Image (cartoon, rainbow, N blue to C red):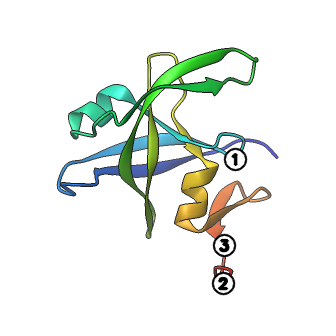
Amino acid sequence: MGTFHVGCKVENHVNRNRTVRLAKALVDTGSEYTWVPSKKLEKIGVEREKKDMRFAMANGQVITRSVGFAILRVANAFTIDEVVFAEPGDQTLLGARTLEGLNLVVDAARKKLVAAGPLPAA
């Protein structure tokens, strides 16, 4: 499939005036969560709501990180989601849960995100 990056805006979900831009987030459908550098989340006042959550890395290593809540925007789409406080050395990732909330899917041929279309309903 190949990899690609997108720009993303992250907002404090309580005070939407507190924002930060991510110039490049790796689109990673293999990661459940979105990973944002801790310093950027702290800068906009995102709180660590869940501490010591365990994550299995691609190499099999298990690590712990904190998680908070933020609003994420890509182009005209936005959603609120849990975000991981990424530490130095961690990648900045746009994960599968956020993509689903944004209602965007990967167009692998064009290496871009596109609208997923109507949401399924019961």
- Residue underneath mark 3: 116
Q: Earlier in the sequence, mark 3 or mark 1?
A: 1
Crowd around label 2: few <14 · some 14–19 · many ≥20 (10 Å): few
- Horizontally, residue 13 falls left or right of residue 82, namely left
Q: Earlier in the sequence, mark 3 or mark 2?
A: 3
User: Hey, what amino acid is under mark 3?
Assistant: Ala
Across and down, in percent, residue 64 comes to 52, 20
Above-or-below relation of 41 to 77:
above
Across and down, in percent, residue 110 comes to 73, 59
User: Hey, what amino acid is under mark 2?
Assistant: Ala
- Horizontally, residue 80 falls left or right of residue 64, namely left
Which of the pair 60/29 is nearer the observer?
60
Across and down, in percent, residue 84 comes to 46, 34
Q: Which mark is residue 121?
A: 2
Name the element at disc 1: loop
Above-or-below relation of 121 to 4:
below
User: Hey, what amino acid is under mark 1?
Assistant: Thr
- Residue underneath mark 1: 29
Separation of disc 1 and disc 2 at Cα? Answer: 23 Å
Q: Residue at x 69, y 85 (%)?
A: 122
Quadrant in the picture for residue 83: top left
Separation of disc 3 and disc 2 at Cα? Answer: 14 Å
Which of the pair 58/49 is nearer the observer?
49
- Is there a contact, CB below 8 Å, between mark 3 and mark 2? no
- Is there a contact, CB below 8 Å, between mark 1 and mark 2? no
Quadrant in the picture for residue 73: bottom left
Separation of disc 3 and disc 1 at Cα? Answer: 14 Å
Q: Earlier in the sequence, mark 1 or mark 2?
A: 1
Q: Which mark is residue 49?
A: none
